[in-house]
Image (cartoon, grey):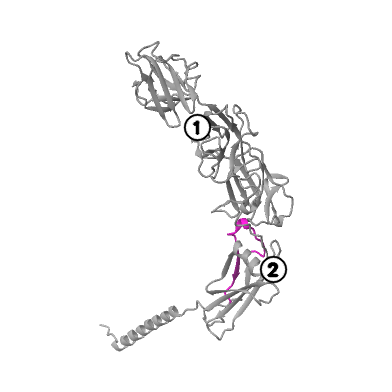
Amino acid sequence: MKKINIKYCSKLLFTLTFLIFSSLLISCDEQLEDNSFDVDDVLTVNVSDSEVVLDERFTESTVTINWTTGSNKGTNSSISYFLEIDKAGSDFSMPLEYDMGKNQFGFPINYKTLNQILLNTFNVEPNTTQELEARVTAIFADSSVSSQTASTSFVVTPYLPVTSQLFIVGDATPIGWDISNAIELVPSTTKSGLFTYEGLLSPGNFKFPVNREGCWCQDFYTQDPTDPTRIIHNIAGSGDDIQWEILEGGKYKIEIDLLELTFNIEESEEPLFSQIWIVGDASPSGWNVDSPQEFTRTSNPFVFTYEASLVPGDFKIFAGALGDWCGQWYRPLVNGQDLSLTEVEQNSGCEVDNKWTITSEDQGRYKITLDTFSNTIKIEKVNLYVVGDGGPAGWDIANPAPFTYENGVYIFNGELGASNPIGEFKISKFKGNWCDGDWINPATESQSIYDSNFILTHGCDGPDNKWQLKDGEAGSYEIMIDLEQNIMTITKI
């Protein structure tokens, strides 16, 4: 049998163990060594755009100043960066300074911020080209490494920011040419330079000032002489004063974009007013513009009605905000216009103050119907009629039996039940066609003629209640109705 040299094996095992252990130590040393801060780069600076014309339409667009790491000379030292921006040629005497910290190699500036810097810090005039310099300084944590600097230049042209407020003024507006009370437009919450106006405009002209200062030499936006859908910025009142003109009064919506220099106007499909009132000594309101009597708005939102007794005197129709004698009105085309004419004009101000006139011969109870869509008016006396087979004229709505009118009271004296002793009737405020006007109906169907409670209905909307004669009730009657007090009496004579 072959003998094993135990001494030799022990030496061999020791040698192998040593080599393996040494290998592990070398491997660990390699893993623990960190060269991440060992950089050797030349510090340089550049700008994403060397020539920039700033545009307010793109305020969030950016100009970015970028730089490389610089060299820490193999010291593994961390590096901090310091950025300066100044006007070219000023040797960074009064620069803007930004401490960028570590691991930052770029600085984006949006157009809006850069524009503010140029206008407010460097006092550059709008639309004037200005060269700027950007300088980056690399500062090392290891003081044995000297700081390093690099710079670059770029050219920027700033813009004049549009106004944050805009107003409308002119004789087409409710405030006329009173610039101290010019109406402010509503700015958009999502887009700079976009404004809207929704409101009344009368025949006349208008333009847009940027404030309510009394000087007409301020900035205005006026119409482009070549295109009415575009605007011109007249700085300090310069340029042609071309205004927009309204030919037909109404409610309008205007959208004006100061960045795109566009103008759009549309007539609203909504009524001009949700409320109107009667004012004048011919009416129950008198000359009271603070709390006059109100018209009733019908199911058609453009049509308003008013009914009352009118006495000798004048009246006109008030619209818009109460309390303003020179506010919005509906007035006849000429002073004292005939009550049978339907023309009416919507206007504002105190210069033209036409009114309708009620004479002593005209006085009585009237129903006024104003259509604000077609700008027409009906001023009609209210007459009452008995309609039905229990009355003198039967069911002839074209020729019903009339009441008389005396001192605010309607009176009927005549026979009821002559042609039909158990007939029925109701009372109309009109004649012609069944659904053309207003009715006075009893409060309940087949109501006793001795029960004078009544309701008012319109057209064929109902309920179509009627007074009902009973056996033995036919005869002569007096019916008295005071519509001002809503009182009715029926008396057998």
Query: Relative to 116, does residue 403 appear above or below in the rendering?
Result: above
Mark 2 burial class by Cα count in 10 Å: few <14, some 14-19, many 20+: some
Q: For residue 153, what is the image quadrant? A: bottom right
Q: Position of residue 60 (x, y in %)?
A: 58, 59
Q: Secondary structure at mark 2?
A: strand
**Residue at the top extreme of this rendering:** 419
Res 292 seen here: yes
Q: Which residues are magenta?
A: 49-71
Residue at the spot of label 2: 131
Viewer-nearest residue: 11 or 77: 77
Q: Position of residue 237 (x, y in %)?
A: 71, 55
Q: Position of residue 352 (x, y in %)?
A: 65, 40
Rendered residue at 41%/29% (across/down): 487
Rendered residue at 57%/82% (across/down): 73
Amino acid type, label 1: Ala
| Residue 308's disc number | 1
Quarter holding the C terminus? top left
Viewer-nearest residue: 442 or 189: 442
